[in-house]
Amino acid sequence: MQDRDLNEYTPSGSNTSKHLSCSHQLCELGPNCKNPKQPCPYVVNYGTENTSTSGLLVEDILHLAAWKNGTSNTNNSVQAPVIVGCGMKQSGSYLDGIAPDGLMGLGLGEISVPSFLAKAGIVRNSFSLCFDENDSGRIFFGDLGPINQHSTSFLPSPSNGNYDTYIVGVQAFCIGNSCIKETNFKALVDTGTSFTFLPEDVYVKVSLEFDKRVNATKTSFDGYPWKYCYKTSSQVSVKIPSVTLVFPANNSFVVYDPVFPVNSNEGVIGFCLAIQQGDEIGILGQNFMTGYRMVFDREALKLGWSRSNCQDLSDAKGMNLTPPPKGTPANPLPTNEQQSNPGDIAVAPAVAGRAPSKPSAASSRITQWRFYLLRLSLLLLQFHIVLDCLVGSCFF
């Protein structure tokens, strides 16, 4: 990890930045501009609590540390051009401190960071994220994962049939040695969401089964958003039942961090099952991924996973960063001509996690803590980034 002083990003302070013009194909709001040469504005609205961000689209450079033979070579970096949304006005949860260092777009769209890197021939079209038990971790662009990893295929979006989000199909949810009937569901794998959400019918069955098997007294804690919380006692050894997801071809995913500890001045006084009721499509959040190296293989459209301490990745495939091939333009971002497919709609390069439902002071602290650690892992631990952003001022 490199210690760096973070500063608010200002395009005028970077000699490699330039505004995206309103005439560019990726400028969704271009038709509303008075002049096609003026900077391209963007607006992104999120689904809850009036959360939004708006500002201008900017092109600039990411500096990535090369990875070779299981070690990082900070002296051999690769410059990768990307488009960022430089936020000028935020609302809702952003004002409560969510994602203070900005958000990095890792989606399947053409304007995400992995897409830019793959198009430039710098890495394979895949990346991995790894969160360890201390809530830190790493991101590796180009990682295809180890040969012995488990995997499952991504599913097309139910709304349009396209592969534009990381959706997987869960066949069964198991508590202890019991796989609960009729708990199959689709879920979005989202590293930007701190905790996990299940469809209502699955949530009820899973929570009741967990409650039946845990040997602790159920209670409630002020300010915590979860329904199934329990007291702990120094006189009783609490046994938390295992939580397992079953994917097609009997691929099992054991959840190593399904509960959230409740602390006081005296230490840990309880814990909560860190799952909430969500929408028709569930969300597998960061807490379910703890202890795993999660591989988002965008070439094979598969999610891979393997146990990892997030330090030893000597078995990584396809991760060597290479400069763009000779003859590649200095800025390989898509041109208007390359992007002008009939019917395509450009979107602003901002990808956010689920904005929290009406948070109390305690739940806000929980969410902010988790989001801070997530942004730390994304922005500091594995690569050097020119665009250091603070206070929601810059959205990747």
Image (spheres, rainbow, N blue to C red):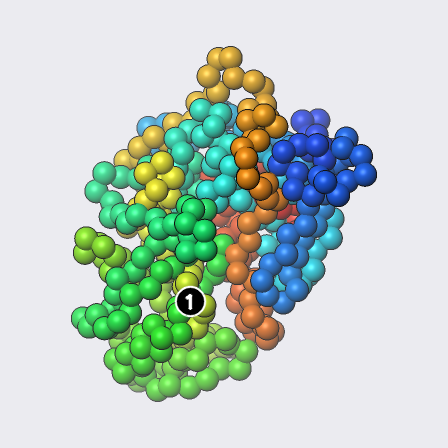
Residue that appears at 66% across and 64% down: 50
Nearest the viewer among 243 and 113 is 113
* Left or right, 282 with reference to 50: left
Element type at mark 1: loop
In the rendered image, which quarter is residue 394 located in?
Answer: top right
Q: Amino acid at mark 1?
A: Glu
The residue pinned by badge 1 equals: 280
Nearest the viewer among 170 and 265 is 170
* Left or right, 376 with reference to 137: right
Specify the farthest residue to the top: 327
Nearest the viewer among 75 and 109 is 109
Q: Is residue 375 above or below residue 197?
A: above
Residue that appears at 43% across and 46% down: 162
Numbered label tally: 1
Residue 9 in view here: no
* Left or right, 183 with reference to 198: left
Residue 88 in view here: yes
Nearest the viewer among 323 and 7 is 323
Whole-percent x and y of residue 229?
41, 80
**Image quadrant where one finds the C terminus:** top right
* Left or right, 13 with reference to 295: right
Q: Is residue 45 above or below residue 116?
A: below
Whole-percent x and y of residue 288?
37, 60
Q: Is residue 235 above or below residue 196?
A: below
Specify the farthest residue to the right: 34
Specify the farthest residue to the front: 342
Whole-percent x and y of residue 381?
48, 42
Residue that appears at 35% across and 78% down: 204
Residue that appears at 26% across and 39% down: 146
Whole-percent x and y of residue 83?
61, 36
How crowded is the residue under tag 1: few (<14 C-alpha within 10 Å), some, or many (20+)?
A: some
